[in-house]
Amino acid sequence: MDLFQAFIIAVVEGLTEFLPISSTAHMKFVGPLIGLKSNTPFTDMFEVVIQLAAILAVVVLYRKKFFNFKKPDFYIKLVLAVIPSIMVALLFKDRIDAALDNIKFIAYVMLGGGILLLFIDRVFNHPMFENEETVNYRRAFVIGCGQVMAIVFPGLSRSAATIITGMAQNLTRKEAAEFSFF
């Protein structure tokens, strides 16, 4: 990977990370277009590490909430939301890796996810709650289960899966989107 390729991948990551689209899938598509050899140990590592900046940006952006140790239930909700993803990733690692290498599969998932996002507001347009406390323990776990879809189906954005699952539980789009950042 040369500096130009690294720059392009970084731009793609930066532009796609905070949208409900899969940044990983976009990097997988752009790589071959710029002559980047996929599935090399360095490229795989780079695609993971470059996402660390986005994770750190969320921590900085939401630092008051993230470092508010007076509300430990926030952290319990995060743990509950991540447990399903960890379990599925550990159990199906080989299948997930194979799916990540299948560009056609990723393209179909991206297309289906995009179509779903176009209609999601019509399906779940009657939120019952208006504040973040409505993300209770059960909803956090269910949202975590929804995020599993993004692991099983590479190309589906984790944030889109979170937003869809949250809205299906009568959260507002804003509440669901904010929880997806964490």
Image (cartoon, helix red, strand yellow):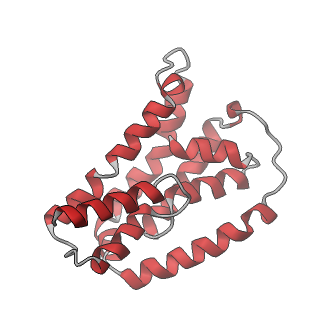
Q: Is residue 94 above or below residue 164?
A: below
Quadrant position of the N terminus in the picture: bottom left
| Residue at far front of view | 4
- Residue at (35% x, 81% y) in the render: 102
| Residue at far top of view | 70
Left-right relation of 143 to 97:
right
Q: Is residue 6 above or below residue 153?
A: above
Left-right relation of 40 to 141:
left
Asked whether 72 or 52 is in front, the reply is 52
- Residue at (74% x, 33% y) in the render: 131
Left-right relation of 131 to 182:
right
Residue 134, position as x, y percentages in the image: 71, 35
Residue 162, position as x, y percentages in the image: 58, 53
Query: For residue 11, what is the image quadrant?
Result: bottom left
Asked whether 165 or 25 is in front, the reply is 25
- Residue at (16% x, 65% y) in the render: 2
Query: For residue 92, what is the image quadrant?
Result: bottom left
Residue 93, position as x, y percentages in the image: 30, 64
- Residue at (52% x, 22% y) in the render: 64
Q: Is residue 53 above or below residue 147?
A: above
Q: How many marks?
A: 0
Query: For residue 114, what is the image quadrant?
Result: bottom right
Residue 69, position as x, y percentages in the image: 48, 17
Asked whether 102 or 53 is in front, the reply is 53
Left-right relation of 138 to 5:
right
